[in-house]
Each structure stands twice: as C-alpha cells, then as structure tokens.
Image (spheres, helix red, strand yellow):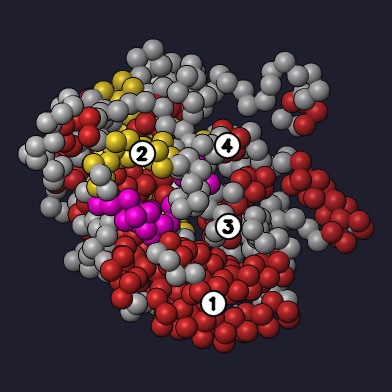
Amino acid sequence: MSEIALVNSPNVGLDKTQKGGPYVNDLSTLNLGPTHPATHGIFQNILTMDGETIVDAEQTVGYIHRAFEKIAERRPFYQITTLTDRMNYCSSPINNMGWHLTVEKLLGIEVPKRAQYIRVIMMELARLADHIVCNSILAVDTGALTGFLYVYQWREHIYEIYEELCGARLTTNMGRFGGMERDLSKVAIEKINVLLEGLPKGLKEFEGMVMRNRIFMDRTQNVGAISAERALNYGFTGPNLRAAGVDYDVRSLNPYSSYEDFEFDVPVGTKGDTYDRFLVREEEMWQSLRIIQQAMDNLPEGPYHADAPHYYLPPKQEVYKNMEALIYHFKIVMGEIDAPVGEVYQSVEGGNGELGFYLVSDGGRTPYRLKFRRPGFIYYQAFPEMIKGSSLSDAIVTMSSMNVIAGELDT
Amino acid sequence: MEKLNNQQIIEALQKTFGEDAVYGIGESHGILQVTTHVDNIVPMMHFLYADPILKFQFLTDLAGIHFPEAKGQELGVVYHLHSLENNVRLWIKAYAPIEAPNFPTLTGLYASANWMEREAFDFYGIIFEGHPNLIRILNLDDMDYHPMRKEYPLEDATRHDKIDEMFGR
C-alpha cells in the first residue's frame, strides 16, 4: 500500500488509532476476481479498501493469454482469421474484416463494391450485437434484468444472420481475402429486414425502461468519469473516448470498406462517465441501423468477391472438375502462396475502439510480425484511476460500461 | 488549412534533430516511417507532441520486433503515432543490440505507454529505463525467457512427425 494513496484518502486525520497500531491497518485488501460473476470475464483486481471506498486498485491481466501473436508467425494468412475471431468475441465479424482489409492492403486486392457493402452490413450488425451486450448487461449490473431480455432476443437474431452468411455464430471466420465467401441469401435479406423493423421497437422499449430511470441514472451518472484529455493520454478509442467528448471515429476519419458512402452521425458525450458511455452506445446502435438501412437500399449489383484466384478459394464444385481451381485450392489451403514484402497498418472501428493490425511481411507464407492493437488492452489501464475514491458497486458498473473483453485484452 | 504532408514532417524533424538523426525514411500506404537513434526517442516524441502544427498527441500502439540477423540492432520498437487533428499517422522506429536492449520509457508523456511497454518487455525483453512498474503483463511472472524472440520455435522442436518439408514450410 503506497503512502500517497493514504494521504489522499478522505478519512485521513480521523483518530482511528486509539487501540491498535497505526491507521494503515484499517485498510483492507479485497480480491475482486479473477472469476467473479460481475466482472464478465477473467479479470483480477486487487482493491485496497477503506471501508466502502476504494483507495487503490491493481489489475492482473493475462489469465486467458493464448499467444496469438506468436502463433500467427507460424500460420498462413487464412489461418489467422480464426485467431481474430477469438479476440473480441462479441463482434467477431469486425475482427475478421479488419484482418481481411489488412491483408488486402498488403496484396493490393481491389474489393468489389457489393462485397464492401455486405461487409459494412455485417460489421454494423456486429456493432449492434456488441453494444446490445454491453448496454443491457450494464443495466443488469445495476439491477434491471428485464430490459436485457427485450434486446437480447435481437442479438440472437443477429447471430442467425451470421449463420446464414458463414455457418457459424460466435467465432464466425467470415469472409475471404477479396470479398465474401457467399452472397447475401434470400433468407439473410429477409432476416435483415425483420431486424430493421423489429430492433427499433425493442430498443425503444429498452430505452424507455432504462434511460431515464431514476435508479439507473443515480447509479451511473458521475460514476467512473474521465476527462477528454486523460482519455486521450490513456489511448482511449471508440465509444469510451467519444463519451468523454472527442469525436474520433475510424469510420469517419479514415473510411474503409466504403464507409464514406454512408451518412451517419458520430455521437459524443460530455462528461465521460458511465451514463455517457451508455448513451453513446445507445445512439450508435441507432446510427448502425441507419447505415444498414442505407446499405440494404443501395446494395450494388455485381460480384461479391474480387477476381483474385491466388488468394480467393475457388468454389468447391470447380475444384473437382477444373485443374486450375484444384491447384489454387491446394495452394491456398496448404498456405503455399508467398505474400509480398511489406509493412502495413490497417485499423477498423471495432466494437470498443480502434482495432489495428500492424503486419510486417518478409515475403514468406506467414507474417514476420503481426501486432494486434487491441483497444481494450490499452484503455483498461485507466481503470484504477477511474474508480479511485468511489465505492465497490461503482467500480462494477464502471468496468461493465468500459466494455472490456477478456479475450481481446489477453489475445 | 492545407493538409499536413509527410515531407513537412521530415523537414521539421531534420531541422530540429539534424539530418543524421532521422534516417530510414520510407512510406507505406501513405504512412511515413522514420528510424532514429534510441537516445533521440524521448526528445523527438516531446517535440512531435508539443509542435503547434504537427500535434502528434496520440500513441496508437507500440510494437516490439526482433531481427536476429541484424547484428547490433536485433531488437526494435515501432511507435505508432497519430496526429488526430491532422489525421496523419507516423511510425518511429529505433533499434538496440540484444545484449543491451535499453530504451527510454515514454510513460512520462503517454499514460497509455505503461502497459504497451510492459508487453514489449514481456515478449521481447526490451528494457524501458525509468518505467514505474516494468514487470510481465500477459505471461507468468516466473517465466525466464521472452517468448516472442525468434529463437523460440512455436512447435516442440523435439517432435519428429512435424518436419517442415512435409508441410511445405
């Protein structure tokens, strides 16, 4: 326990030393985690408490570290997509697309417009799923379970749309280098239309229940606040940074995958507290719906993948009767194709911030170095500063609203 | 206002730190990269942060990297800077020998550098001098090596059923 924290503690000066030793002994240590139901993931926080007040906190991370960056140095590019799924598993399609965009940048593949639009739709669906989880669980953490059930069925619906496109729900491995593996099916389009009609109703119901709820507001306003300056210094990105009042959104500042074609607003908060983070995410969901609607309305005709036979897996029926297709299939699956020498950085607006991929290629079949910029890893550092002086229950909602995903943080 | 271009950044850096201090200038998909000596990192970061035009005030990421063949400069650090106002990105690279991989810490300027540097220390053994808490972050505390260095193969080297040749590697 450091002396400095003790001096800052509000109770210093009170005479608590009548019987026992010095005042230091009155501080207690509380182990929050590593497996605690309220931390939503494997995080350990060693809190130093003065009664109900948190005096100091120290995090331990890395409980589910799986050495993705090391594994990636041994894997051909296609096999790395499955690693990205397992980072932010609440919005895996965004991770997949981010990785595909990175490799396409290195290889110089031009993606057709239709594929870009399908990607935008899938990425925005993933953002919806991510924010639904974060916001409804925040409500649950403050004691409101019902609202969670209203919106969670739509997350299930989004997973069904994923299934239509890639066959998987959570770890999607969606898309290919150069586009998508399949076009939007009739069922997928129907399901997206159902979502566009139904989710706004569910969302409104949820907002009506939670947003102006006195208890919810008391629990979240002025809790875990951070100033814009500190947030930038701590490397915040995504909704957490925007809640502090900085309008940095990768989608609008460095558009990728045709985001420049769409009209959407970037909501910002003012205080950077838990309530602002909640409101920013709510508004982003409405904006995501807007983007999906625009993409569905203007979905261009044409191919859904680039003509890049060296990198795009040929259709399976072709593999059985066409020699070139068989050769390419074999080469791609075995990872026999060398990538050009180069160094690229590509970032996308992930569910909780700027998700970056720094790829160094030495011309081999695998990356020489691949660094994932995980937003959660970088902004979770600020957690002790945000909860110092608040109570334990505030720390729980602060953590919940920061949307830290253990899989992403620990890679 | 005209958009900041990479040439302006190079000129500003060379004017302040001398032409010898900024080398390895290159561009990759629009992102400028420069290499500098380890001693220049802290003054250069402060200069880029404080300059009223450049305003590189956001540390996006910090990546360690290992080149076993480059003798005397085996370990490197790539700083990813972002000037949010100009929307320009910049990579600053520096290298140090593996026997003495000492880099200055950036925690005085960027609070976010704390864990990024711990990560680079954890995986590459890069020592950031002046760091307040330079301990392992993702790996076990009692691990006695730095796993991302190239001398540690990913797969068990004693296995004979996984010969590189068989897998086209």
Q: Earlier in the sequence, mark 2 or mark 1?
A: 2
Horizontal and vertical percent for residue A87? 54, 49
Three-letter code, disc 1: Tyr
Magenta region, residue range: A390-410
The residue tagged 2 is A30
Q: Residue at x 19, y 44 (%)?
A: B48
* Occupied quadrant, residue A152: bottom right
First reached walking from the N terminus: tag 4 or tag 3: 4
Q: Chain of mark 4?
A: A
- Camera-side mark, 2 or 3: 2
Number of labels in the image equals 4
The CA span between labels 2 and 3 is: 34 Å
Of A143 and A354, nearer the camera is: A143
Task: Respond whether the residues carrying marks 2 and 4 are from the same subunit.
Answer: yes
Q: Which residue is mark 1?
A: A150
**Is A399 contained in the magenta span?**
yes
Residue matched to label 3: A92
SS for callout 3: helix
Q: Quadrant of the N terminus of chain A?
A: top left
Residues flagged by tags 4 and 3 on a common chain: yes
Q: Chain of mark 3?
A: A
* Percent of width and height locating residue A331: 77, 44
Mark pair 4, 3: CA separation: 17 Å
Q: Amino acid at mark 3?
A: Ser
- Outermost residue on the right side: it is A321
B33 relative position to A364: left or right: left
First-in-chain label (1 vs 4): 4
Toward which corner of the image does residue A58 lie, by quadrant?
top left
